Image (spheres, rainbow, N blue to C red):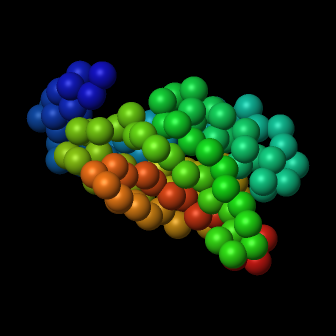
Amino acid sequence: GNELTLDMLVMAQKVYGETAPQKLLFSFFQGRGDRYLSKLRGKSVIERAEELAKLRTAEGCFAKVEYNAGIGLQIVEYHTPFGEVARRYPIIHEMETEMLARVLNYPVERTVVEAGGLSRVVFRVKALGS
């Protein structure tokens, strides 16, 4: 879980230097993106976003796709499995966003929406006139 991951990243930094955790995280997101790309079969960006949301839900992100003319296309996630790792290494958010953009082949913008003590992450896909 998160504790093991944090311990491994700290150890990598001690053994391999200051940038080791970021390099490992970068490699993780490159591999995750490659895995997503190998599983997506949809032709349109909406089909690909729906397939991606299913894959991410299976990983614990509780993702869903929303689309309407006013907001455009977005993937909304109600949980992140990165927890404490993301608090310690906030660069994860940028890496994750870049990975999603690569997988969807469109720019992606990440925002966090908080309400009533709960938060959700919104990945807005800059496609379809948005």
Asked which quadrant contains residue 115, the reply is bottom left
Given residues 123 and 66, the one toward you in this image is 66
Which residue is at the front of the view, 37 or 66? 66
Q: Is residue 36 left or right of residue 25?
A: right
| Residue in front for this viewpoint, 78 or 27 | 78
Up/down of 36 relative to 113, above or below: above
Depth check, front residue: 4 or 9: 4
Residue 34: % across, % down: 63, 38
Which corner quadrant of the image does residue 44 belong to? bottom right
Task: Pick out the residue farthest to the left.
Answer: 14
Q: Is residue 47 above or below residue 111?
A: above
**Is residue 104 visible in this depiction of the protein?**
yes
Residue occupying image coordinates x 35% and y 38%: 82
Q: Position of residue 16 (x, y in %)?
A: 20, 36
Horizontal side of 106 relative to 28 (left or right) equals right
Determine the residue positioned at 39% across, 34% down: 81
The quarter of the image holding the N terminus is top left
Q: Quadrant of the C terminus?
A: bottom right
* 108 shown above or below 80: below
Lateral position of residue 3 relative to residue 80, left or right: left
The extreme right residue here reads 43
Relative to 4, is 72 on the left or the right?
right
* Residue 87 on image: x %, y %: 23, 47
